[in-house]
Amino acid sequence: MLSDVPNSQAQARREIVSYQVNCTKHGQHELAIACIHVCHATKSGASIGFYWSRDTDGPRPDAWCRSCELWNREHPGAPLKEWMQEANFQLLCVHCWDEAKAMLFDRFQEAG
Ligand SMILES: [Zn+2]
Ligand SMILES: [Zn+2]
């Protein structure tokens, strides 16, 4: 005999996930996303450019370098998945993101 289990609102439990990353440099912070080249450039200081998406629902928009930007322009019909593989997006904390922008974009702007 099957007992009739009351279906109380389907018990839809919505977990609010706070996306955080434990940065070795800055500690626990909200996370941002940047391509692997940007992540490497924050350490090497290589001038690889800095681009970011206009729309974001995170604390920072996704960011990528010049070569990823060019790849994107040269493959306008490419599925997003392919570009994601090309850029190999990495997680980094928002402070690292800010540092990357300051290093790769702001400095470049000042240089004219
Ligand atoms: Zn890149
Ligand atoms: Zn950091």
Image (tube, rainbow, N blue to C red):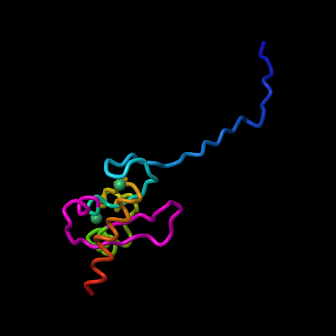
* Point 22% across, 72% down: residue: 47
**Rendered location of residue 66, percent (x, y):** 28, 72
Q: Would residue 41 appear left or right of 8 to someone viewing this image?
A: left
- Among all residues in the image, which is located at the extreme bottom? 112
- Residue 72 occupies quadrant: bottom left
Residue 60 lies, with reference to residue 26, above or below; the image says below
Left or right: residue 28 compared with residue 90 = right
Magenta part of the chain: 39-64
Q: Is residue 55 magenta?
A: yes
Classify residue 12 by image quadrant.
top right
Q: In which quarter of the image is residue 82?
A: bottom left
Q: In this rendered view, identify the residue nearer to me: 23 or 10.
A: 23
Quadrant containing the N terminus in the rendered view:
top right
Looking at the image, which is closer to me, 68 or 31?
A: 31
Residue 50 x/y as whole percent: 32, 72
The mark total stands at: 0
Q: Is residue 40 magenta?
A: yes
Residue shown at the point (40%, 62%) measured from the top left:
80
Give how far across and how far down residue 32 sits, in percent.
42, 58
* Residue shown at 19% from the left, 68% from the top: 46
Residue found farthest to the top: 1
Task: Name the magenta segment's main secondary structure.
Answer: loop
